[in-house]
Amino acid sequence: MRKILHVDLNAFYASVEQALNPDLEGLPVAVAGDKEKRTGIILTSSYEARKFGVKTGMTVGDAKNLCPNLVLVKPNFKNYMSYSIRVMDILRSFSPDVEQFSIDEAWVDVTGCEHLFGDGAEIADKIRHKIKDELNITASVGVSYCKLVAKMASDLKKPDATTVVMKEDLEKVIWPLPINDLMGVGRKTRIKLNDIGIFTIGDLANSSLSFIEKRFGKVGRYLWYFANGIDNSKVSTLRETAKGIGNSITTPRDIVNLEEASEVLMVLSESVGKRLREHGLEGDVIEITVRTSDFNTFVRQRKIYHHTDTTYEIHKNALKLLSENWVNENRIRLLGVRVTGLRESSGFKQMSFFEEKAVQKNEVLDRCMDTIRDKYGKNAIVRASMMVNESHKSINIVSDKEWTPMNPFNKGGGNL
Amino acid sequence: MWFTCEKDVLQEAINIVQKAASNKTTFPILEGILITVEKDRVILSATDLDLGIETYVNADIHQVGSVVLNSKILGEFIRKLPNDVITVKKENNDVYITCLKSEFVLVGNNPEEFPKLPVINENTMYEISQDLLRNFIKQTIFAVATDETRPILTGVLFEVRNEVLSFVALDGYRLALKSYEIGNKDNISAVIPGKTLIEISKILEPINEPVKITFTPNHILFNLGDTKIISRLLDGEFINYRQIIPDEYRMKVKVKTNELMESIERASLLAREGKTNLIKFEIKEDKMVITSNSQMGKVYEEVNIELEGEGLKIAFNSKYFLDVLRIIDSEEIYLEFSSNVSPCLVKKVDSKDYIYLVLPVRLVDTV
C-alpha cells in the first residue's frame, strides 16, 4: 500500500501577508487585485475574514459590506512564490517524490519513509510543524493510499490539521459528501448527475459503472473510479513531467530598444537557468514570448543542437531570436523566456571546437552565483550589466505554466 | 518532339536527374524534368536552382523539340511500365507515352519557363575516378553540421594544396579529413553543399571511370561522361581546420576496427536510453574497458589493444565513434590521445590518407 500526503497551504496569500507583517496578525485580511476599486476581486481572505463570510471571488465592495474592518492588501506574487518554493523544499526534505499541483498545493509520496519519520500521520504532523516553525503559515495535510483521496482528505479539516482517510474509511467519510466535492465534477456535471438522482459521492460509487459510462462516456468511467477511491496515478516530480521551464515579465514601462530588452532577457534567463540547474535539467530549445504594446503576442523558438543550462547561452539565443523577429517600431510590454526539449543533465558535456572556453567559464560562473545567492540572497551578487538600470531589480518575474500542469491523475502507473 | 528508346535506359536517366528536382511546390516548374530532343540526342535535366543534373539518353530520334514533365509522375509511370520500347511524342501541349498496350498522356509545361543551368566552360581542372570520389564523400559527409548555426559547415571543403586533394567536413564536435596525392595541379579551396555530395554519391558507381571536375567562382561541375552535375558552392571562408588538428599525442592505442565497433555498438544500446549516448573508455596496458549505464542497466566491454604510453579514462558520445568505425577502410586503427579533455585522433594503421578527430565529453565543473 502506498502512503500519499496532500499538503494544502491554508489561506495562502493572506497567510503570507500576515507572516510578513505582524501587525496583520489576528485581523481580517484579504488580498485583492484592485483594492482601491470597489469592483476589485478578493483573491484570498484570512480565516478571521472568512468568519464574516468574505470569500474568494467576491468584489471588494461586497466584502467590505460584510466586514467593514477588513484590511485589504495588494498581492505580492514574488513573496508568495518564494514562500511556495520554501514549502516545497521542506516537503522534499521528507521525500524526493514531490508533485506540485499549484502554488499552494502538493502531493508527497512517503511510501517507505516510515522508518525515517514515522507513519503517514506522524510525517504529516512533522511537515505541518516544520512549515509553521520556519514560515509561520499553516497547512492542512491529507493522508491516504492515493493522490485523489489524499486531496479530498486535506479538505476535510482546515486550517492546520492532519486527516487520515484509508480505504476502509471511504464509505463513512467520503461517500456522504456532496457530489461536487469530487475531483472533476463541476457545476454542469453536478446538474446532470443530480438529474439522474445522484447527489452524494456514495450515490455515484454505488451506481452501475456501465450505466454511468453509457451516459457520460469516458469521463463517466473516471468519475465512477474516483467515487470508488480508485486512483493509481503516480506522484511525479518535475523531472518526469516538465516539458519546459520558463519565466515572463510584464515590464514596468514599455521597452523601446534592444539594449533594454537584453537586460530584461538577462533577468529572465538568469531565473530560467537557475531553475533548470536546481532541477538538474538541460534543454535544447530556446523560446521567447513577446507581447507588444498593441497587445499582439508572438512566440518564436529555435533548436540549438546541444543541451544547455547556462544563463549565458539561454540569454544569447533569446536575444538573437528577439533581434531577428522584432520590428523596432513596436514597443514591448511583456517578455518571456522558456527552455524546452528537456532532459536530465548527466553532468557530462560534449566538448566543442567553438566557444568551448566561454561555455566552460559560464558553467562555473553560474554555479558559483547560484551558491552565493542561495546563501546570501538574490541581490548579493549581480551582473554588472544589471547595475545600469536599477529598476530591473524590482521586476516581478512570473513563472509560466509551472502551476498549471496537465491533469495530475493522468500520469501513468494507472490501469484505469 | 518524338523519340523511342528502351524503358531501362529512360528509367535510369530519370532516376539520375530526379535527384536534382525540387520537392517544394513554391516554384512548380522546378518539380519537372526538362526533356530536350536534339538532332542526335535526348537530354534530360532537372534543377532546384542549387543543384542541377543533366544526362544523355540513347534514343531513336524522329522529331526534335522539348517539354517539361512532372518528375514524380513521369518517374513512377515509367518505372511501372513493362520492359519494352517506349515512344514519347508531343502533340500540341500533350505528351503521349506509349509502351506495348499502355498509353499515358501528360500535360506538358512550357520549356521556355525552365531555368537554364549555368553554362560552364569545361576546361577540366581535376580528374579522379568515380570510385575514389565515392569514397571521399562517404568518409567525410557524415561529419558535416546538420544545424544552420554556421552555414559554411553544412558543406564539405574541397581543397587542393601542395599537390594533395583533401575533403574536410566538421561540425562543432568532430572532423573528418580524407586526402589523396593528385599531382601537380592548381591550388583551390571551395565548399560544396553536403546535399549535393549526398546526391552525387548515389549516382557514382564503384568503377574506375574518371570524373572530370571544373570550378567557377560560384559553381562546381562534375562531368561523368553521360551525366553532368552542377552545384552552387557555399559562400564564405571555411574554418581553418589545420589549427584544430594537434600534431602531438601522449599515448597511442592500436586496436582492431571491428572489435572496437562491435563493443561500442553494444555499449551504446544503453547509452542511447539516457539520450546522451555517453560511453566511457578506460585504457590500461593491454586492454580498453568500455562501459555505459543508464537507468535501465549497465554494459561492460573489454577490447584487446596495444598501448604506447600511459593509460587514461575518457568519455565520448558513442555516435561520434560509431560513425567513423563504420566507414573507415582499415582493419586496424590507431587512436591517439593526450588528455581526457583534448581531442582523440583516429588514423588508419596502413595509410595516412584519412584522419578523424573527435572531441570527448567532459565532466561539468561544479564549484
Image (spheres, rainbow, N blue to C red):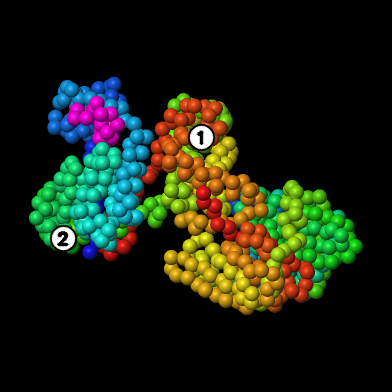
Q: Are marks 2 and 1 in contact (CB under 8 Å)?
A: no
**Drawn side of residue B187 relative to residue B297, left or right:** right
Q: Nearer the viewer, residue A199 or B16?
A: A199
Question: Does the magenta run of residues contain A368?
Answer: no
Residue B3 position within the rendered picture, expressed as x and y whole percent measured from the top left: 74, 67
The residue sitting at 9% across, 51% down in the picture is A176
* Residue linked to disc 2: A167
Q: Quadrant of the N terminus of chain B?
A: bottom right
Q: Nearer the viewer, residue B20 or B61?
A: B20
Q: Kindly state the secondary structure of the residue where label 1 is placed.
A: loop
Mark seen at residue B161: none
Label 2 and label 1 in one chain: yes
Residue B201 in sight in this render:
no
Q: Kindly state the secondary structure of the residue where label 2 is placed.
A: helix
Q: Can you say whether A42 is above or below B119 in the image? A: above
Determine the chain carrying the residue at label 1.
A
* Residue linked to disc 1: A382
Q: Can you say whether B350 is above or below A105 in the image? A: below
The residue sitting at 15% across, 26% down in the picture is A66
Extent of the magenta region: A12-33
The residue sitting at 25% across, 48% down in the picture is A127
Question: Does the magenta run of residues contain A29?
Answer: yes
